[in-house]
Amino acid sequence: MLSVGGSHGNTTAAEIYVPSTHTWRAAASLNWSRYLAPWGAVLLADGRVPVVGGNSVWKIAETWNPVAGFWTNTGALFNARTSNFGRVRLEEGRVLLDG
């Protein structure tokens, strides 16, 4: 399990849950803050996790690569996500956002 962002303090924090030890370990920090406003993530078939949204003005998307252990900026959305929105991985691998 990957936990990112927050509402106070370090909003670029990322942590990974380790089930075998029931503990959390630090992961590389996000490139962009994810806080308060809705943001979303979806697990890709190869294990990467794109994250989008996070406040009312940023349209930045970035992707966690668990093999490499870091985040990569993946471009900007056409529109910022300022309220709850859906996201789903499509069969061919693309991610669909609505809302």
Image (cartoon, rainbow, N blue to C red):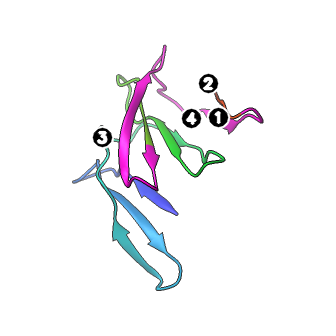
Vertical relation: 13 (above or below) 22 = above
- CB atoms at circles 1 and 2 under 8 Å apart? yes
The picture places residue 29, in percent across and down from the top left corner, at 28, 51
Q: Residues within 10 Å of mark 2 (few under 14, many from 20)?
A: few
Give the residue drawn at x 40%, y 52%: 68
Give the residue drawn at x 52%, y 30%: 83
- CB atoms at circles 4 and 2 under 8 Å apart? yes
Q: Residues within 10 Å of mark 1 (few under 14, many from 20)?
A: few
Question: What mark, if any, has residue 86 been given in the picture?
Answer: 1
Residue type, mark 2 in image: Gly
Question: Which one is nearer the viewer's eye here, 90 or 35?
Answer: 90
Q: Secondary structure at mark 1?
A: strand
> Which label's residue is closer to the chain start, 1 or 3?
3
Question: What mark, if any, has residue 84 been given in the picture?
Answer: 4
> Which label's residue is closer to the chain start, 4 or 2?
4
Q: Nearer the viewer, mark 4 or mark 3?
A: 3
Q: Which residues are magenta?
A: 64-92
Residue bearing the label numbered 3: 33
Residue type, mark 1 in image: Gly
Q: Secondary structure at mark 3?
A: loop
Q: Residues within 10 Å of mark 4 (few under 14, many from 20)?
A: few
- CB atoms at circles 4 and 3 under 8 Å apart? no
C-alpha distance separating marks 1 and 4? 7 Å
Give the residue drawn at x 52%, y 40%: 40
